Image (cartoon, rainbow, N blue to C red):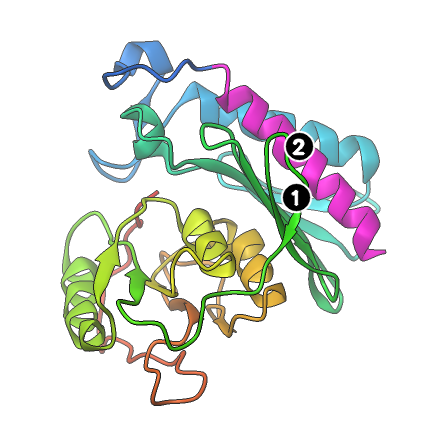
Amino acid sequence: MSQGLLAVARAAARAGAAVLAERTMTPTPATQAELGADTKSSGSDWVTDYDRRAEQAVRDIITAYRPDDAISGEEFGHTQPKNSSDYRWSIDPLDGTTNFIRSIPQFCTSVAVQGPDGWLAGAVVAPALGRTWYASAGGGAYSTVEGAEPVRLNGPVLGRSGRLLATGFAYAGDRRDFQLAVLAELMPHFGDVRRIGSAALDLCMVADGTLDAYAEFGTQEHDWAAGALIAEEAGVPVRRPFSGDGTNHPDWTVAGVLDPEQAGGTELRRPTSVRGESVED
């Protein structure tokens, strides 16, 4: 079952990424008019016509193969068929919208499916990088580069020096202050930090060993759904948020070992009070 769902996830993610690939990456950022872009929660929170068209392309593939499955997407919300199955898809058509607008190639389409027993399959396609990551429950995680054979992923190299931590930040306010304070607490365990701008790619890059760990507070389900499964299937310890609503019920998404002296090392403190607000990507 998981392999069949994975085939749909990969096809759907490719369809969304194909829409994103229609935009030629230019030496300078695209204009708001060129992208049909609008802001959402803040002046840094963008949505473009590409987000919307990519989500529709993803939905078309899923609906063609799995018409009775529910779909939750970043742009068009939740769709529940009348005679719904026990499966639900979580999709982010363009994770890394700010990167996309500014011609930074770290952006992707992310697609995952959840069943009665948990997350079953996921795929992440980054068209400007020519990379795909995918996994199925119990089937391992893999990555491909265009024109090459898939490579099975095994997570970061344990014990290496100069470990890299990836994270992300809210657009403004108390939540960002909290994130920065926790980052300062984590940095003694790492050689440096990276801010990729796409939670899905952060998780995939921990899965393939490019990064050693990832921790971010307040991400949405569609940000982490596919990437968390890919990291988990690569043998990486993963902590998913308790809620998929990262705005009103923020929580930590963690992949990898944060403190090498503590086995697992995926727990982080929570704020006593942080107002709800959207996060990056």
Is label 1 in a helix, a strand or a loop? strand
Vertical arrangement, residue 115 with respect to residue 54, above or below: below
* Tag 1 near tag 2, CB within 8 Å: yes
Is label 2 in a helix, a strand or a loop? helix
Q: Could you give the CA–CA distance between mark 1 and mark 2, rounded to whole angstroms?
A: 8 Å
* Residue in view at x 80 percent, y 56 percent: 2
The numbered dot on residue 257 is none
- Give residue 69's position: percent from left, percent from top: 76, 46
Q: Which residue carries the number 2 mark?
A: 59
- Give residue 206's position: percent from left, percent from top: 45, 60
Q: Amino acid at mark 1?
A: Ile
Q: On the picture, is 278 further left or further right than 176? A: right
**Over which residues does the magenta segment extend?**
1-22
| Residue 94 visible within the image | no
Q: Which residue carries the number 1 mark?
A: 71
Instruction: Reply yes or no: does residue 281 show up in magenta.
Output: no
Q: Amino acid at mark 2?
A: Arg
Question: What crowding class fits label 1: few (fewer than 14 Cα within 10 Å), some (14-19), or many (20 or more)?
Answer: many
| Residue 156 visible within the image | yes
Vertical arrangement, residue 160 with respect to residue 47, above or below: below
Vertical arrangement, residue 112 with respect to residue 44, above or below: below
* Residue in view at x 77 percent, y 42 percent: 7
- Give residue 4's position: percent from left, percent from top: 83, 48
* Residue in view at x 63 percent, y 65 percent: 233
